[in-house]
Image (cartoon, rainbow, N blue to C red):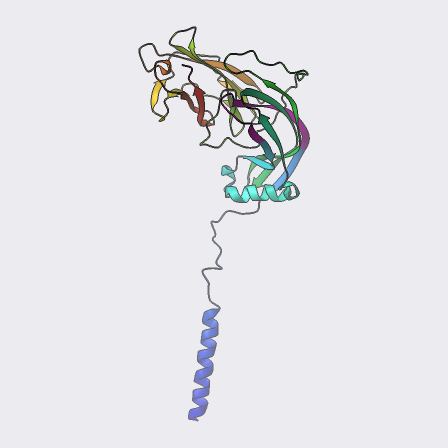
Amino acid sequence: MLNNRFVKLIAFLIILAILSSCGDNPATLSAPDEPNQDVQVTETSNDVMTFDETIHINNCGGKAESKQVAQRSFSTNIEGAAQLKVGYEIVEGSVTAKYGQYRNISKSHELAAPAGTDMEFVLRWTEQTWVGSITANGSSGTYNVHVPISVEQVSSQDLGCGGSAPVVPDNPPTATPIVAVIPLTDTPSNSELSVRQSWSTNGVVLTLESAALGKDNSWWHEFTFTLENRTGGEIFFNANDAIIEMLDQSYTIRDEMHSYREFLPDKLANNESARFVVGFNTLYEYDPLSTSEPYIYIRVSNLSRIIDALWKIDVPH
């Protein structure tokens, strides 16, 4: 009888252990408030686009050839991801998965500027684009996918160093309209650009076209910019929020924009551009021409999506 009771006790303990292990496991419980992770990606259109890119390499002070590689790769641009209540990585991953066969495609072109030249190159890019919508949790957004197809060098010319006349190319390129296209890559935040180079952030492109230090042999310094909208839709600008500063080599602010602005737009339609001029009068303030500094910086902040763009400018002495 005792052995029979002992066997029944052991059996009861085994059954109790099995029932306990089948209880609620916190790792497998579903959170009732967790958003639906199912993301629907629907393509609405596709097209092949061609556009020109101007690249400047100043090698006036160089003693050897200076090279630069221009490259574009598979990229995605997503608008409205925040309102989907799904992590951005999930949304981007869903779009990338749909076009996964193109993910490793890239095109590049090497440019070379001989010593003692100030070269300007024009590259013509062709790319395949797809546009579509993203839906999740009852909300929607849009996406653009860009894959480079080809790149060719249209022209090159030496702009000349030290005030010499620029060399005109034998076969200057014909004007090609810029189609609606979003730049594939943003400019890294720690970049230092040169005159005639462009800063891109989420489809907004700002180019410093020219820098005239000591214009008309005075304390007047004038900078001309071109602002472009390649976001795929209309974009608005608040001119009162924009800050344009002149800085020294240690990034110390020496002068803020205070003289005038011309044609700084309130808004730009897709693929529309506008040129504006910024001037500094440093007669009674910091003047780069009166110092021994070899270069200064111009920084543009809070101009729509352009948060902190920087151009390095040689100071003539």
Residue 293: x, y in percent?
37, 20
What's the magenta region? Answer: 46-69
Main SS of the magenta segment?
Answer: strand
Task: Decide which of 14, 241 is in the foreground and name it.
Answer: 241
Residue 51 in the magenta stretch? The answer is yes
Task: Give the answer, above or below, for where 143 lies relative to 116.
Answer: below
* Quadrant in the rendering for residue 64: top right
Foreground: 248 or 2? 248
Q: Please state if 91 lies on the left or on the right of 17 as rendered.
A: right
Q: Position of residue 239 (x, y in %)?
A: 43, 18
Relative image position of residue 290 (x, y in whole percent): 34, 13
**Residue beneath the point at 48% across and 73% down:** 18
Q: Is residue 189 magenta?
A: no
Tell me where residue 258 sits by quadrant.
Answer: top left
Q: Residue at x 34, y 16 (%)?
A: 291
Q: Quadrant of the N terminus?
A: bottom left
